[in-house]
Image (cartoon, helix red, strand yellow):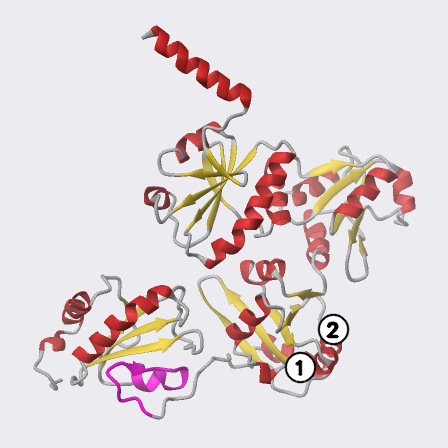
Amino acid sequence: MQKIYTIFAFLAAFALISGVSAYTEEENVLVLGDKDLSSALEEFEYVLVEFYAPWCGHCKKLAPEYARAATVLKEEGSTVKLAKVDCTVEKESGERYQVKGYPTLKFFIKGEPIEYEGGRVEKEIVSWLKKKTQPSTSEVTSAEDLAKQINSNEVLVVLFGGQDSASYKAFDSVSKQYDDVTFVYTSNADLKKEQNVADDKHVLILKKFDEGRAELSGDVTVESLKTLIDDNRFPLVLPFDQKAAQKIFGEATPAVFLMHQKNEAGERAEAVFREAAQKLKGKIQFSISDFNDGGLGPRLAEFVGVKESDLPAIRIVVPQRQASPKKYLFDQDLTVDNLVKFYESFKDNKLSPFLKSEPVPESNDGPVKTVVGHNFKEVVEDSDANVLIEFYAPWCGHCKSLEPIWNQLGEEYANRKDIVIAKMDSTANEVESVNVSGFPTIKFYQRGNKRNPVNYDGDRNKEAFIAWLKEKAPAANAPEGEL
């Protein structure tokens, strides 16, 4: 027995010496499961874990950025590990950490999880992790040091003063609150002169967009410094990319969008849009989306109901954390004054939300009723029938699998007046009272209680649907054709 123990001890020591990992790796990302996740969290002080599903489009998009971030950290000798867990296989891990959607990222510090709140591209992932594991400020002592920081950072906040200065405590506190901004300090008075900063100012922001710099007047407090940073950390007009999407939708920031093409009409619209942005600086975020960029542009246009024939088009979008975003349609001549008035009407709650809708079908006599935004009230909310409706997306694999079953269910109740089986394409139609967070979403609108629809959460087969309907709508047991 002693000999066997010695052999195991030698192998373990050899693995540590030779750098052989006890875990499977793919592109420097640890591949973990229910059995080894706990041991990894115990072994490594810092672990970022992605809980994913192989079929998830967002997970597929994140994968190369995640791998590049893992590689950068490994090459830098970081102690931070990046890992991933396939929750379609490792279901125990998903349940333990309450994974509700994909991808879900959690950062573990000595085994304790916190929510990951960084971006989804390599630089943002690395920056966020460094902020959580390294000092959030660093000192520069020479012109060369400062030049390197300026060249390598899109937004750099410089404090002219050392750790013993009156301003440093507020500076250090604020530095921990921003993952996409770099903070440096210096006691070298010559650097202040070189940057043309007045004696009574102690903070300078250098940025690679707009006017290029901003200075803080008055005392350096947490509030004044945050205000300065918030006003300058993003371009006045954001190009709609992954970073902009994170700021607007991830942080629930109201925004005015210009969707256009790169043609003469688009260029004219952009010039007007940028001038209006100057007039409304600090009041609402402006963002420009290219309809033909092949990435987020077409997806944003579909989301807000803009077709190519509508371009250039302008919408205000108000993301909400617990509900569907609200959208407002600009339908005036595109002038600076009209854009300013559009914003003021929005601010004063004088605008009605814009809701997408396909045309009402000319014929709707099939066993499954087609519902669009314009006839939702008539077919669902105001009808005398109990309505079971599927909110679906044409591209959703689960919806496609459900379709033949849903059609069979419609046939089952085709001759009934008290039960209606319906469906609505939620990518092309919206209803203010309905918040759809995943596909398919199935809701039951009970006769006499249409204001409180019930979510269907049973099995997705014909027999289960029928049994559920009999429980929720007792009239479903009545003979055919009776109410």
Snapshot quadrant of residue 72? top right
Give 5 or 278, whichever is nearer the viewer. 5
Give 387 or 188, whichever is nearer the viewer. 387
Residue indicated by mark 1: 341
Snapshot quadrant of residue 92? top left
Range of magenta residues: 363-381
Residue indicated by mark 2: 274
Quarter of the image with the C terminus in it: bottom left
Q: From the viewer's perspective, is residue 190 above or below residue 446?
A: above
- Three-letter residue code for mark 2: Arg
Count how many numbered circles sit on residues in the image. Answer: 2
Q: Is residue 178 visible?
A: no
At x 62%, y 43%, the residue is 126
Q: Residues within 10 Å of mark 2 (few under 14, many from 20)?
A: some
Residue 91 place in picture, x, y as percent: 33, 45
Give the mark nearer the N terminus: 1 vs 2.
2
Q: Which residue is situated farthest in the top direction here?
A: 2
Q: Which residue is situated farthest in the left direction here?
A: 479
Q: Is residue 109 left or right of residue 451?
A: right
At x 10%, y 83%, the residue is 480
Q: Is residue 206 magenta?
A: no
Q: Is residue 50 visible?
A: yes
Q: From the viewer's perspective, is residue 462 above or below residue 478?
A: above
Q: Which residue is situated farthest in the bottom direction here?
A: 362
The mark lying in front, picked from 1 and 2, is: 2
Snapshot quadrant of residue 384? bottom left
At x 60%, y 40%, the residue is 71
In the picture, the disc for residue 39 is none
Q: Is residue 371 magenta?
A: yes
Residue 238 place in picture, x, y as percent: 68, 65
The Cα atoms of the two marked residues, 1 and 2, are separated by 15 Å
